[in-house]
Structure formats: C-alpha cells, structure tokens
Amino acid sequence: MITHGWLALRESADAAARATDLVDHIRHHLPATGRWLIHDLGGGTGAMGRWLAPLLPGAQHWVVHDRDADLLEVAAANLPGPAAEGSAITVEVRQSDITRLQPDELADATLITASALLDLLTGDELDALVGVCASAGCPVLLTLSVVGRVVLAPADPLDARVAAAFDAHQRRTTEAGRLLGPDAVAVAVETFGDLGADVLVRPSPWRLGVVQAPLAAAWLAGWIGAACEQEVDLAAEIDAYAERRQTAAAAGQLAVTVDHADLLVLR
C-alpha cells in the first residue's frame, strides 16, 4: 500500500530525478493562451503538480485522480506554487480508479501526466490507459517508471540475487493479471507508437547518498522485503545482508542508484 509518509519521503528525490528537458518540449506543444487543463493520473498527494506547475507558464487547472481519498486530501491541502510567470494554479481532486477511465473523463485535456505508475500496471491496464490518453489528443508525460537496473556502492555479493528476485516480484501475477514491472516502459513506447505517436524517452535515475539516507533506508526495506516475498529461499541469508545494508545506509555510507525512465508522448 502506498502511504503518505512514503510519498513525502520520496518527493524531493523524484523532483531531482525527473528529466527537465522534456518540460521544454511540453511548452512548445501547449496552447499559447488560455487556461491549461492538466490531468494527473494516480496523482496521490499531488507531488507531480508541485514539481511541474511552477515550471510551466500560464494559468493551470490540475485534476488529480487517485482511488485513495486520504492521499487526495493531502493533494487538496498542499497546492502547487504559482506558475512560472506568476499565474495562479487551481487543483481539483477526483477519487477514481484510473485503470477504468473513460475518454470523456479526459475531454479537453491540455496535458496528461502520471508518475511512478506504469510499472504497477498489467498489460491490459496499460493498453486501456494508452487508448484513453491517445484519445485526448494532447501531450502525455509519464515519469519515473522503473526499468530494472539498481546499483549499490559499495557492492555486495547478494545484490544481484536480491535485484533479480525484486524484478520477478514486480512481474508477479495478481488478480488483475501479470504486472509489467520493468518491462512497462518498452511496452508503453511500442503501444503509443502503434497509434502513431512520437515518444521521447529520457533517463531519470534516483541517486541516493548521504542527504537521502532516510529514503535509501526505506527503499532498501521495501526492496529487500519484496525480494524475500518472491524468493523464500533468500530468507536464510537475508537478515545479515539487510543489517549490513541498512547500517551503511543509515550512516550515509551507501550510494544507491535506481534507474527510471521518463516518457513524453506527442501527437
């Protein structure tokens, strides 16, 4: 379950990681006048708006979609700052399941965004989401999708095994179907491309060091926990590994790079 605490902990690292050059492309594909209508899918506490809205000029109305009412409460209370040239930003929250969105719910959108979402979807869910986004006929910015590459320094002999088990966990089969996990970026690029869209892809890695030690520790706990859930044989060796890694992270002596990719879809 995604919590407010986890999202707050990662917000600054997400902001630092996102590919800002894609914002320049967005500016060239948005109307020069009028208020922009921006839909943020699976937007949680509204962190995407707090990062992106101040980078764009012009009046903006953000619609944050999420199924978690508690997260949406935070989004409604923590609004983005003014736009780049000082225009006011307004925010509306909608509790909904973004895997069941209908085209009319994104009607008149100027821009569609999502963050840390694609790798949580099944193939069918991604197909449906791509179709709905494509029907809106506007740019789509999809940031921070994991791609299955993690580097820890200094290295440990168990790193590769834990990483492989974690990736397998991300591709596990759920009631909704098999999750795409690290395959989601490639599938999204292909699916949007089949609909005639141009897709720009940029790296957006987390680089966690001493300043981000609390986030590195929390990420490690989740990473190791998911790996053990997937590969139960790891349990015999994982306690000592987890202790080594957590001790180093807490002391700011562990550098963690978690690779992600950002996509900008243009029609």
Image: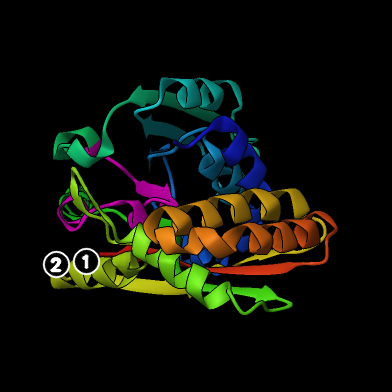
Q: Amino acid at mark 2?
A: Leu
Q: Residues within 10 Å of mark 1 (few under 14, many from 20)?
A: many
Q: Looking at the image, what colour scheme do you see?
A: rainbow
Q: Quadrant of the C terminus?
A: bottom left
Q: Amino acid at mark 1?
A: Phe
Q: Quadrant of the N terminus?
A: top left
Q: Nearer the viewer, residue 49 or 116?
A: 116
Q: Residue at x 77, y 64 (%)?
A: 209
C-alpha distance separating marks 2 and 1? 5 Å
- Left or right of 187, for residue 185: right
Q: Residue at x 36, y 32 (%)?
A: 65
Q: Position of residue 163 (x, y in %)?
A: 49, 70
Count the marks. 2
Q: Write down the region rendered in magenta.
A: 106-127
- Could you say which disc has been placed on residue 195 in the image? 2
Disc 2 is placed on an element classified as loop
Give the vertical position of 162 relative to 217 (above or below). below
Please indicate, yes or no, whether residue 1 appears anywhere in the rendered image.
yes
Q: Position of residue 115 (x, y in %)?
A: 45, 50
Q: Which residue is mark 1?
A: 192
Q: Residue at x 74, y 77 (%)?
A: 154
Residue 53 highlighted magenta (yes or no): no
- Left or right of 169, for residue 135: left
Give the vertical position of 195 relative to 65 (above or below). below
Q: Residues within 10 Å of mark 2 (few under 14, many from 20)?
A: few
